[in-house]
Each structure stands twice: as C-alpha cells, then as structure tokens.
C-alpha cells in the first residue's frame, strides 16, 4: 500500500479507468457475438445491422484508447468479411 498521497490518488484513478475500460471491452465482445450469431443463423440483414453497431463500438473504443486503432480496424475487417461471406 502506498504511503504517498499522490500515489494513493493515482491508485484510485487507475482503478476507475480499469473498471471503465473493462466495461467497454465487455460491450465490444457482446457486439461481436451478436454479429457472429446472426452470421451463423444466416440472417444477412440482422448481421449487417449488428456489424454496423459493432463497427461503431470498435471505433469509439479506439478513440478512447481502450484498444489500439489498428486492432479496431482488423476486427472491423474480420466482421465485415464474415457478413459479406453470407452472399457466397
């Protein structure tokens, strides 16, 4: 445990940020699972709508610094690849 006042405050703010980031990451996983469920069901319209929601969530997470922007781009690419594969 820290003895220095500024470090105690830093520990508190780090914990708040960790909880916030955890919530954002969890929401991302849920959004991506919705896309995968729609793709598995073969419902193109639902998959496309879920992909747009997931894409927006990924962009927001990247802008907040929760995930790296390149990771967001790679995940969006993978999601859209699965959705577009429904036509084939």
Image (tube, rainbow, N blue to C red):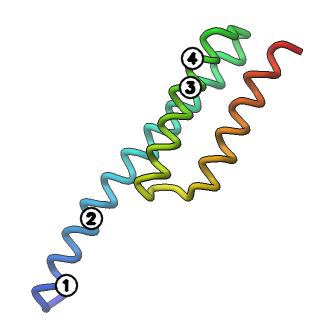
The crowd level at tag 2 (other Cα within 10 Å; few <14, some 14-19, many 20+) is: few
Which is nearer the N-term, disc 1 or disc 3?
1
What numbered label is drawn on residue 7? Answer: 1
Marks 1, 3: nearer the viewer: 3
Residues at marks 1 and 3, CA–CA distance in whole angstroms: 41 Å
Looking at the image, which residue sits at the far bottom?
3
Q: Nearer the viewer, residue 17 or 77?
A: 77
Is residue 50 shown left or right of residue 79? left
Disc nearest the viewer among 4 and 1: 4
Out of 29 and 83, give the one closest to the viewer.
83
Q: Residue at x 73, y 10 (%)?
A: 42
Circles 4, 1 touching at the beta carbon (< 8 Å):
no
For mark 1, give the secondary structure.
Answer: helix
Structural crowding at the residue carrying mark 4, measured as other residues with C-alpha within 10 Å and reported as few (<14), some (14–19) or many (≥20): some
Q: CA distance from mark 2 to mark 1?
A: 12 Å
Q: Earlier in the sequence, mark 2 or mark 3?
A: 2
Question: Which numbered marker is on residue 53?
Answer: none
Q: Quadrant of residue 36?
A: top right
- Location of the N terminus by quadrant is bottom left
Q: Is residue 55 above or below residue 40?
A: below
Q: Is residue 61 above or below residue 30?
A: below
The crowd level at tag 1 (other Cα within 10 Å; few <14, some 14-19, many 20+) is few
Identify the mark at residue 52; answer none if there is no mark. Answer: 3
* Circles 4, 2 touching at the beta carbon (< 8 Å): no
Instruction: State the image coordinates of residue 77 (x, y, percent, origin top left).
Output: 71, 39
Residue 53's spot in the image, x, y percent? 51, 26
Residue named by callout 2: 15
Q: Return the residue found at the far right.
A: 88
Give the residue pinned by disc 4: 49
Q: Which one is earlier in the sequence, the residue at label 4 or at label 1?
A: 1
**Is disc 3 in contact with disc 4, using a CB cutoff of under 8 Å?**
yes
């Amino acid at each position: 445990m820290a003895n220095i006042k500024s470090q105690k405050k830093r520990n508190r703010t780090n914990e708040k940020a960790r909880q916030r980031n955890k919530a954002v990451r969890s929401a991302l996983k849920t959004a991506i699972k919705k896309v995968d469920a729609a793709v598995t069901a073969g419902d193109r319209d639902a998959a496309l709508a879920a992909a747009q929601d997931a894409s927006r969530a990924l962009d927001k997470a990247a802008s907040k610094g929760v995930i790296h922007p390149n990771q967001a781009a790679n995940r969006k690419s993978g999601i859209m690849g699965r959705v577009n594969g429904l036509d084939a």
